[in-house]
Image (spheres, helix red, strand yellow):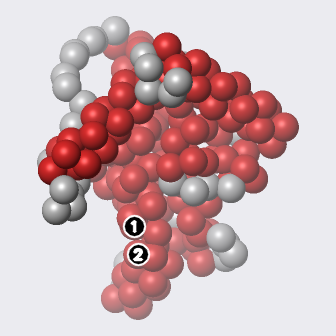
């Protein structure tokens, strides 16, 4: 590939780096795996530069490729039947590393609410958690989620509704919502 291809690739992909990395982290739940998935996406996308140049919405196209890479890797992992358990780690220092205010009591309460929400999200089914995270946290539109995971927009809407309802139930059970 030439230097002009490198510049073209960077111009098309760089504006989507943050969103793509967050998607990788949301899909994998672990920093190292998210970095690997993100890198794998970049390698694959660079190989498809001719296609990428022709696309109006490269962010959605790149997200779809990343999702497919993620699903392919999960299938390979399931076939290997190798299981490891690790603590999930958020980018940086995780929730505890979020900037606070000058009010330590409020910061502590905020951190506790975030931990309860994170725990509640972990109790959702994988498909519901993914849709809630993509829509409510990352700001993906319903049509983008439809393209990303390959289900009709009506199904996306109903899963989002059910996921939010279940999340409300879980948070009410633990006393977060009264």
From the top left corner, tell me how far across and down residue 103 is, in percent.
Answer: 19, 56
Helix, strand or loop status at disc 1:
helix
The tally of labels here is: 2
**Residue at the disc numbered 2:** 14
From the viewer's perspective, is 78 left or right of 155? left
- Please tell me in which quadrant of the rendered image residue 28 appears: top left
Does residue 31 appear anywhere in the picture?
no
From the top left corner, tell me how far across and down residue 98 is, in percent.
Answer: 22, 54
Does residue 167 appear anywhere in the picture?
yes
Q: Indicate which disc residue 17 carries.
A: 1
From the top left corner, tell me how far across and down residue 125 is, in percent.
Answer: 54, 19
What is the quadrant of the N terminus in the image? bottom left
Q: Indicate which disc residue 84 carries.
A: none
- Please tell me in which quadrant of the rendered image residue 153 appears: top right
From the viewer's perspective, is 25 left or right of 94? right
Q: Residue at x 66, y 47 (%)?
A: 145
160 shown above or below 40 = above
Q: Nearer the viewer, residue 13 or 133?
A: 133
Q: Residue at x 19, y 45 (%)?
A: 105
The crowding category of the residue bearing disc 2, from other C-alpha atoms within 10 Å (few below 14, some 14 to 19, many at least 20), is few
From the top left corner, tell me how far across and down residue 158 is, in percent.
Answer: 78, 31
Q: Residue at x 43, y 16 (%)?
A: 174
The crowding category of the residue bearing disc 1, from other C-alpha atoms within 10 Å (few below 14, some 14 to 19, many at least 20), is some
Q: Residue at x 22, y 16 (%)?
A: 84
Residues marked 2 and 1 touching at CB (< 8 Å) = yes
Helix, strand or loop status at disc 2:
helix
Cα distance between the residues tagged 2 and 1: 5 Å
Q: Nearer the viewer, residue 93 or 82?
A: 93
Residue lying farthest to the bottom in this orientation: 4
89 shown above or below 142 = above
């Amino acid at each position: 590939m030439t230097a002009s291809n490198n510049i073209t690739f960077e111009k098309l992909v760089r504006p989507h780096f943050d969103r793509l990395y967050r998607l990788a982290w949301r899909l994998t739940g672990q920093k190292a795996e998210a970095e690997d998935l993100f890198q794998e996406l970049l390698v694959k996308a660079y190989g498809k530069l001719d296609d990428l140049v022709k696309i109006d919405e490269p962010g959605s196209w790149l997200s779809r490729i990343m999702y497919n890479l993620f699903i392919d890797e999960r299938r390979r992992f399931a076939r290997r039947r190798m299981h490891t358990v690790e603590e999930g780690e958020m980018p940086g220092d995780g929730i505890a590393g979020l900037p606070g205010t000058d009010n330590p009591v409020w910061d502590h309460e905020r951190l506790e609410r975030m931990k309860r929400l994170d725990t509640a999200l972990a109790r959702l089914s994988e498909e519901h958690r993914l849709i809630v995270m993509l829509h409510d946290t990352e700001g993906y539109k319903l049509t983008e989620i439809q393209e990303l995971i390959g289900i009709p927009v009506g199904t996306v809407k109903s899963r989002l509704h059910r996921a939010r309802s279940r999340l409300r139930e879980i948070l009410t059970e633990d006393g977060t919502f009264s």
